[in-house]
Amino acid sequence: MFGLFKKKKIVPEFNFSNIGVDMHSHIIPGIDDGAQTLHDSILLAKRFKALGFKKLIATPHIMADYFRNTPDTINRGLDILRKGLADIQLDLEVDAAAEYYLDETLEKKVKQKEVLTFGKQYLLFELSYINAPQNLFDFIKIIQDAGYTPVLAHPERYPYFYGSIESYYRIRETGCQLQMNSIALTGYYGSGAKRAAEEMVENHLVNFIGSDMHHLKHADALEESLNTPLMQRLLSQHQLNNVLI
């Protein structure tokens, strides 16, 4: 009988409010493979808000021959997005940087300081998914010599790093920071990326987490990631640099 009056165990409800900032998304409308319309962007922004985020860093792709964005096109898109959010009175801060592809054009942009960064001069860049770059460590030094801190986007997604936790350690030892896609922990990108993400968390190699949000399926997976033990560990026990932005 007395068991009826026992206090129920309170299960903590995890969300992203304790880090507050997502630093990798494709929410600016119509300039890359992310949100295509302002309506799409607003739907994604509402999901970010519901998951506890207070601030977003939009990071459109910049890639020669595919996504020829510039600081000007990105900032114009940012203005459109901010106005759209203001019109519906959605209290969500949005800034912009970019996700740069490591190609033949990037070195010149970095040296001429024609890049968009976030936070403390963090520069987000990505690699080919097919071929391991031969000049990765040289390029990391070029970024650093220009006064920026390199952040490698979603290292868990590059198959040539699978089974080699030492690769992540070597990259980290240069001073380059690692940004894991949160949804990798759900298996969204497959078992190889899931295991690589788990190894990164278990070895305390994650500096930033990001949504890499492109569409609503990513939003669903991001919400699902909150149910994984390793995401709960990241949010409650690890020091993530998202809080510094």
Image (cartoon, rainbow, N blue to C red):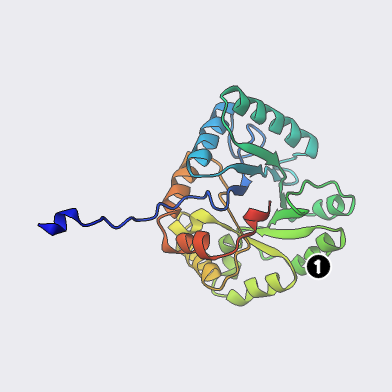
Q: Quadrant of residue 39?
A: top right
| Foreground residue among 78 and 99 | 78
| Any part of residue 193 in sight | no
Residue 92, horizontal then vertical, whole percent: 60, 36
Query: Residue, x 77% and y 66% (percent of image)?
Result: 135
Say above or below: 195 vs 242. below
Give the amino acid at mark 1.
Asp
Residue 72, horizontal then vertical, whole percent: 79, 34
Residue marked by disc 1: 138
Residue 197, horizontal then vertical, whole percent: 52, 64
Query: Residue, x 73% and y 51% (percent of image)?
Result: 119
Query: Residue, x 26% and y 55% (percent of image)?
Result: 8
Q: How many marks?
A: 1
Q: Is residue 175 left or right of residue 38?
A: right
Q: Secondary structure at mark 1?
A: helix
Q: Is residue 195 left or right of residue 116?
A: left
Residue farthest to the right, as pictured: 112
Classify 10 Å Cα crowding around label 1: few (below 14), some (14-19), many (20 and above): few
Q: Quadrant of residue 173?
A: bottom right
Q: Quadrant of the N terminus?
A: bottom left
Query: Residue, x 88% and y 54% (percent of image)?
Result: 111
